Image: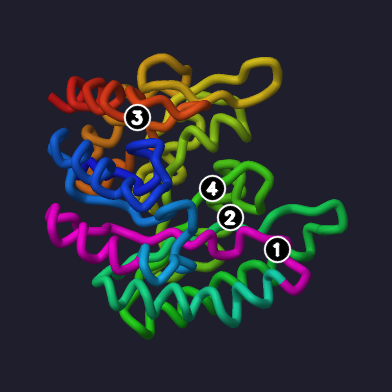
Amino acid sequence: MQVTAVTNEVYPDATPAGLDKIFTRATEAGVSLFELRIVEGKRFPYFDADAYERLIAKSKAYGITYSAASPGLFKAPLRGEIMELHRNHLLSMSMDLADAMGINALILFGPSRRPDDSEGDFNQIVDLIGAAVDTAAARGFSVQLENLPGSWADTSDNCLALLDAVGRSSFGYVWDTGNLYEAEQQHFRAGYDKLKPYIRNVHLKDGRIIDGKMVWQRYGEGVTDVKGQVEALRADGYTGTLVMEAACQPHHLDDFPTSVKYLQSVLA
């Protein structure tokens, strides 16, 4: 399994000086593989030109490679101008920049749920995602669905329904049990076996519900059972990425190194 960091989860600094701190901290912990999301406070691919140049230069200097890019694609209501912008512009922009950086995997989400949605919208969402997957595959990209509370891909069953219905070999799943726990409040085992055939990427984060709100915590302090997840994946021969979403709320300097040590102890 490949331990992977996220650009905005390693060090709480969104200034131009932050990349050195982020990459130094990660590489000192033996992590040089990253998932690209937010750089200097802006989400991929909407980086400032100077930030992009710094990202490229610092990535080369520190030997950083990227497993996937997450532009927040389809993280919007199904109907409206924002979704049209995602469909017609964000997807192509994301592929262009990812291609320039040598990244061949993109992450997308189920559209955000709204009160006027109906179950009849499911087929429209399948068509939306399927078209994006086909467009990406034609350019050599794989696509991964990430689960998120409040979206059409929130629970294990809803994710499975979309994965089955889209049904493309280049379409896989980001197993994010922190997000699943927030949506379902069940142990990861409740949905793991049904989703296992689709897992191409894993997001690790820990936490618990406090006063009705999900609060992210350091690995081993919450109830999502990071240790059990890693052990289950290893038993099933998973060799993909373990992406550390290690930032707590608020984001403290010790969040990443503390969780790295915990994860390394589990993997030892």
Could you tell whether 227 is left or right of 222 in the image?
left
Specify which label sits upstream in the sequence, 1 or 2: 1
Front residue of 19/143: it is 19
Residue 147's disc number = 4
Q: Residues within 10 Å of mark 4 (few under 14, many from 20)?
A: many
Identified at 43% across, 37% down, the residue is 192
- For the residue marked with disc 1, what is the amino acid? Phe
Secondary structure beneath label 3? helix
- Secondary structure beneath label 2: helix
CB atoms of marks 3 and 4 within 8 Å: no
What is the x, y in percent for residue 168?
Answer: 43, 70
Query: What segment carries the magenta color?
Result: 52-81
Left or right: residue 19 compared with residue 122:
left
Label whose residue precedes the other's in the sequence (3 or 2) = 2
Whether pointer 1 and pointer 2 mark residues with C-beta atoms closer than 8 Å, the reply is: yes
Q: CA distance from mark 1 to mark 3?
A: 30 Å
Q: Position of residue 152 (x, y in %)?
A: 66, 53
Number of the label disc, if any, that sits on residue 122: 1
Inter-mark Cα distance, 1 to 2: 9 Å
Could you tell me residue 146's position as x and y percent? 49, 52
Q: Quadrant of residue 28?
A: top left
Whichever of callouts 4 and 1 sits on the residue coming sooner in the sequence is 1
Nearer-N-terminus badge (1/3)? 1
- Left or right, residue 192 beside residue 98: right
Can the viewer see residue 264 in this picture?
A: yes
Q: Mark 2 vs mark 4: which is more N-terminal?
A: 4
Foreground residue among 28 and 195:
28
Residue to which mark 3 is pinned: 229
Name the amino acid, label 3.
Answer: Gln
Q: Residue at x 46, y 22 (%)?
A: 217
Say what amino acid the circle numbered 2 marks. Answer: Ala
Residue placed under numbered mark 2 in the picture: 161
